[in-house]
Amino acid sequence: MQNVIKVSKSCPKVSILMPTFNCEKYISYAINSILQQSYTKWELFVVDDCSTDNTKFFLSKIFDKRIKIIILRKRVGPYIAINNVLKKCRGEYIAFLDSDDVAHKDRLKFQVNFLNKNADTTLVASKFKKIDENNAYIKNKTYYISPNELKIKFPCENLICNSSVMFRKNILNEIKFLNKKYFYSNDYFFYLKIFKNNKIKILNRILVFYREHNFQRTKEKQMQKKIILENFKNLNWSKKNGLVNKKNFHFYYKTYIKNLCKLLYLIIFRKL
């Protein structure tokens, strides 16, 4: 681990939140990607959610004053872990980075510059690439949603990479981050509530590398049914709050049927 001890005397512009659980294999890549940022006015909160591997030992070796290590005594899940730290954030902007993902070295620079220049935008995310367990690109494909696609598709499914998100902290005065009814898609529901009355921008630039591996929560069998049920909850919320209209009703209906088919498959064939 590279230890950087030079600290800006001014208040950090960006507070980065990184919850982690049993991520000893990848967390060094995530933290080093922040240490190597070209933009330096940041603070990083790493919240260990009762890891049982060597994650806590790795974190104990970090001595950069900009990095705050919080070790939880009871496992609460990533969303409660994040919510408990939000009050400690000093930055004007808040960014997320999952502990198994990697930020491009200019991620903070481009997103901070964009929010500084576009006061009408509350949240900014970016294009991303997928990487595997060995940091190799998966199919060398990029993932990006255009402004028009955002209006049509985003109310129906989450197309934003969580690790690419940066938003203005003051939006938390209007919209709460945590909803304890959500186990999997609290982040998407938070973004939906922002999207209802605020502007979201997806930068057409690769600023994050999203890692796919066998230990992700989304791949756990017990999670599959919860994910689909929360998808229905988000679809119903979008419709109730006027985010579904004539322009995107077809996509809403298509997404609803797709989730229904997945749910029936799990119930009938996998007995979940």
Image (spheres, grey):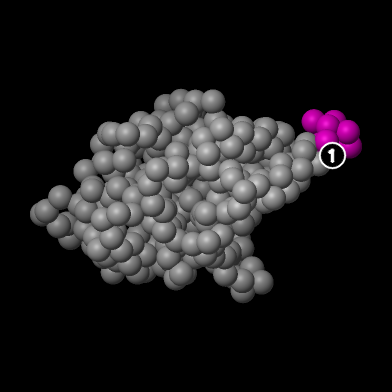
Q: Position of residue 125 (x, y in %)?
A: 43, 58
**Mark 1 belongs to which amino acid?**
Tyr
Residue ID at (53%, 39%): 242
Q: Is residue 75 above or below residue 9?
A: above
Q: Residue furthest left?
A: 9
Q: Which range is magenta?
A: 264-272
In the foreground, 212 or 164: 164
The residue positioned farthest toward the bottom in the image shown: 140
Residue 99 in view: no
Position of residue 253 relative to residue 39, above or below, is: above
Q: What's the residue at 38%, 32% (across, down)?
A: 176
Image location (x, y in percent) of residue 141? 61, 71
Magenta-span inclusion, residue 271: yes
Circle 1 residues within 10 Å: few <14, some 14–19, many ≥20: few
Give the left or right position of residue 60, taking residue 138 as reference.
left
User: Which part of the image, by quadrant, shows the C terminus?
Assistant: top right
Give the quadrant of residue 6: bottom left
In the image, residue 31 lies at what x, y percent?
39, 56
The answer to whether 208 appears left or right of 175 in the picture is: right
The residue pinned by badge 1 equals 265
Q: In the image, is 73 to the left or to the right of 240?
A: left
Hey, which quadrant is residue 126 in on the image? bottom left
- Magenta stretch holds residue 261: no
* Image: 32 above or below 68: below
Residue positioned 65% across, 47% down in the render:
249
Position of residue 24 relative to residue 180, above or below, is below
